[in-house]
Image: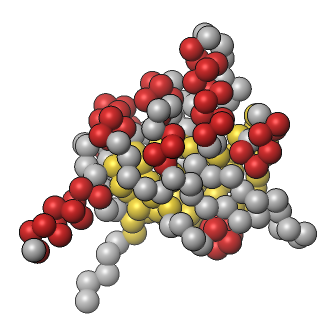
């Protein structure tokens, strides 16, 4: 049986790196990523619409749609898993225009987001849901950056090592979910 290859990547991601990736690629991502969920996204977009600077630069950043649980004694972070990415869809085009390059979450994105990712030459990765305790082992450090009042949904910077991901939406408009659906229809 042929073993699928795994691509090791390091952030920050660039357009050149994103153009090399294809929907379905398996990735081990290392480097620095931000965490932000719905409330932080809403604040980012509201600040941009008011013409205010963001509390963190999004240039070539990757956001992990996650909110970790409190760290148990002796650990730097609690469980951390992806949340449903579609909840960020209303905010994502604005943040891509502000410099965001990559996103990590779970679930299908809208056609508008697939097109926005293609236009931005970005990338959307899926992380495995339901293994948040295991995912936390990929986190090497945690720094609070903004919106502390949001509690676990505050914006954090995570240093990660070999976070396992799958490319869902690539810089050419590829969509892993659509590819799987097409393959299933062919098999019928």
Residue at the location (31% across, 31% down)?
119
Image coordinates for residue 152, horizontal then vertical, percent? 76, 49
Which residue is found at the position 46% from the left and 45% from the top? 86
Q: Whole-percent x and y of residue 164?
A: 51, 66
Residue 15 location in percent, x, y? Answer: 38, 37
Q: Which residue is the extreme one toward the top?
A: 51
Percent coordinates x, y for residue 81 in the rendering: 61, 61
Quadrant in which residue 132 is drawn: bottom right
Up the image or down, 50 lies above or below 153; here it is above
From the viewer's side, name the closer residue of 24 and 15: 24
Q: Quadrant of the C terminus?
A: bottom left
Q: Residue furthest right?
A: 73
Q: Does the image show residue 74?
A: yes
Q: Is residue 180 above or below residue 15?
A: below
Q: In percent of the image, x 25 and y 43: which residue is there? A: 173
How many numbered marks, from 0 up?
Answer: 0
């Amino acid at each position: 049986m042929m073993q699928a290859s795994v691509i090791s990547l390091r952030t920050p991601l660039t357009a050149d790196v994103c153009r090399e990736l294809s929907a379905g690629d398996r990735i081990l991502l290392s480097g620095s990523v931000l965490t932000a969920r719905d409330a932080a996204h809403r604040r980012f977009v509201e600040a941009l619409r008011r013409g205010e600077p963001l509390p963190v630069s999004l240039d070539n950043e990757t956001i992990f749609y996650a909110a970790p649980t409190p760290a148990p004694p002796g650990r730097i972070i609690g469980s951390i898993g992806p949340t449903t990415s579609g909840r960020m869809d209303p905010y994502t085009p604005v943040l891509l225009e502000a410099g965001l390059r990559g996103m990590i979450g779970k679930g299908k994105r809208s056609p508008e987001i697939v097109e926005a990712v293609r236009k931005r030459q970005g990338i959307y990765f899926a992380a495995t849901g339901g293994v948040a305790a295991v995912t936390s082992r990929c986190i090497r450090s945690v720094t609070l950056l903004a919106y502390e009042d949001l509690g676990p949904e505050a914006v954090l910077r995570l240093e990660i090592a070999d976070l396992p991901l799958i490319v869902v939406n690539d810089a050419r408009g590829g969509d892993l979910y659509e590819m799987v659906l097409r393959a299933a229809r062919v098999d019928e």
